[in-house]
Amino acid sequence: MISSVTICSSSKFYDTARRAEDLLRKAGLTVYTPRYDYSEQQVRVGESDKIRLTREFLDKVARSDAVFVIANGGYAGVSVCIEVGYAVGQGKTVVFSEQPTEFALRALVDAVVPVDEIGDEVRRISRDSPAGGSA
């Protein structure tokens, strides 16, 4: 059963990520988030910052049971793809908010749960769920 989750998101979707964070917390989960203060829409993130932030974020993924990927329009950027691959390599459950457009990512999806449908049932999703299935 999932008790903690890390939200993976492109910085352009941080508004959606914050909404998902609120709903996941209401469902009783411990939630790790991106550093909202480093939104690339608002600040310039240099190479050294990106390296540090990536390492910090992968530590969050390692501490969680699952990742919840904000994939508005099916989009997942390079960093999110790295985070998903890392999560899968560690045996974490992978949940997307929308079916990813990248076919290779679809092989890694345990469930698709739209943000507005996040509820207590998210806790019961597992790596054994049908690939690409809904909660």
Image (cartoon, rainbow, N blue to C red):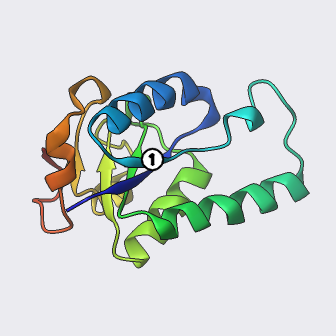
Q: Position of residue 20 (x, y in %)?
A: 40, 31
* Pointer 1 local density, CA inside 10 Å: few below 14, some 14–19, many at least 20: many
Left or right of 15 on screen, residue 39:
right
Vertical relation: 39 (above or below) 32 = above
Q: Position of residue 101 (x, y in %)?
A: 37, 42
Residue that appears at 30% across and 36% down: 98
Count all numbered tags in the image, as a single digit. 1
Residue 53, by quadrant, is bottom right
Q: Secondary structure at mark 1?
A: strand
Residue that appears at 87% across and 35% down: 44
Left or right of 91 on screen, residue 60:
right
Q: Position of residue 3 (x, y in %)?
A: 30, 57
Q: Position of residue 34 (x, y in %)?
A: 61, 44
Left or right of 71 on screen, residue 48:
right
Residue that appears at 74% across and 33% down: 37
Task: For the N terminus, give its image quadrant.
Answer: bottom left
Residue that appears at 31% across and 32% down: 26
Left or right of 28 on screen, residue 78:
right
Residue type at mark 1 is Val
- Pick the front one: 108 or 49: 49
- Pick the front one: 88 or 58: 58
Tell me the residue that label 1 is attached to: 31
